[in-house]
Image: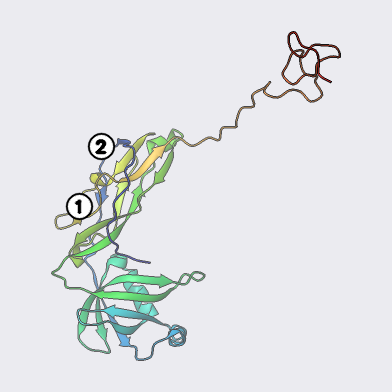
């Protein structure tokens, strides 16, 4: 799973009504550091990675300013670091084989499709005085008025991309949707960001909407389009066979 991504253009959408009464709010910034000791890996390959996982270690890569370093992290240590209040945006003070510490952030990680546990991580060394780009999760808060009236709440944007110093990246965003009525929408432009945090996405991007539930409409059957089975064609109707001795055309005899 990639935690930071390039900004892509948002497709144009019909503009829905926008709730203005209660703007969405931003929660506390990550602002948390966690010390973690790792070991440098000298042996690479799938077999070695499986061996490390059996020992409770997670293989990974530390991308630094010089060159990448293959590392192994204790599964418990990593889980403890990622379950702090900062979550996946925590700044990790990584010490390789007991050496000097490197400030790093979680760049990417992979999970086992069945068990769900992390199987590989990529860490990116950062400078605390230089901005980084990060994807911040948006959660919805409250029950919309429109839902109580029979509407359906849909979240169409789950994260927003920002630029900030590593210790100032928001932990996550919370959008209050309690006042949304049917036909209303809340947009990124309604989020309030603290000083030092720059939005990278289109501010007009819709976060969530309340719409009328879709109903299946059965196609109508038009009667009289086809004749009833076994019914004789009307006299003079196209395709009806002429009676014996009847002229097929005005002034002409029937052909043999």
Q: State which quadrant residue 152 falls in.
A: top left
Distance between the alpha carbons at the discs numbered 1 and 2: 16 Å
**Left or right: 218 in relation to 12:** right
User: As rendered, which of 249 and 24 lies closer to the eye?
Assistant: 249
Crowd rating for badge 2 (residues with CA inside 10 Å; few <14, some 14–19, many 20+)? some
Asked if residue 169 can be seen in this view, the reply is: yes
Give residue 138's position: percent from left, percent from top.
32, 53
Q: State which quadrant residue 197 falls in.
A: bottom left
**Left or right: 57 in relation to 98:** right
Quadrant of the image for the N terminus? bottom left
Q: Earlier in the sequence, mark 1 or mark 2?
A: 2
Q: Residue 20: which numbered mark, if any? A: 2
The residue shown at (20%, 79%) is: 65
Secondary element under disc 2, as helix, strand or loop, is: loop
Give residue 148's position: percent from left, percent from top.
43, 36
Asked if residue 179 can be seen in this view, the reply is: no
């Amino acid at each position: 799973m990639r935690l930071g991504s390039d900004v892509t253009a948002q497709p144009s959408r019909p503009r829905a009504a926008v709730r203005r009464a209660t703007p969405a709010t931003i929660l506390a910034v990550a602002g948390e550091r966690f010390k973690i000791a790792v070991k440098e890996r000298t042996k690479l390959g799938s077999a070695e990675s499986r061996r490390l996982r059996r020992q409770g270690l997670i293989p990974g890569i530390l991308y630094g300013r010089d060159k990448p370093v293959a590392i192994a992290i204790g599964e418990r240590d990593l889980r403890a670091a990622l379950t702090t209040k900062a979550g996946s945006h925590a700044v990790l003070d990584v010490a390789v084989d007991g050496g000097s510490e490197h400030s790093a952030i979680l760049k990417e990680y992979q999970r086992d499709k069945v068990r769900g546990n992390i199987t590989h991580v990529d860490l990116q060394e950062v400078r605390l005085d230089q901005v980084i780009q990060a994807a911040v999760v948006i959660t919805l808060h409250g029950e919309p008025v429109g839902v109580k009236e029979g509407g359906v709440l849909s979240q169409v944007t789950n994260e927003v991309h920002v630029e900030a110093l590593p210790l100032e990246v928001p932990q996550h965003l919370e959008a209050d949707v309690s006042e949304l009525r049917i036909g209303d929408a809340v947009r990124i432009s309604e989020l309030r960001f603290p000083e030092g945090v720059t939005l990278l996405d289109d501010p007009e991007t819709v976060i969530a909407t309340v719409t009328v539930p879709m109903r299946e409409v059965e196609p109508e059957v038009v009667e009289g389009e086809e004749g009833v089975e076994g019914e004789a064609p009307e006299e003079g109707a196209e395709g009806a066979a002429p009676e014996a001795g009847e002229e097929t055309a005005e002034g002409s005899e029937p052909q043999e």
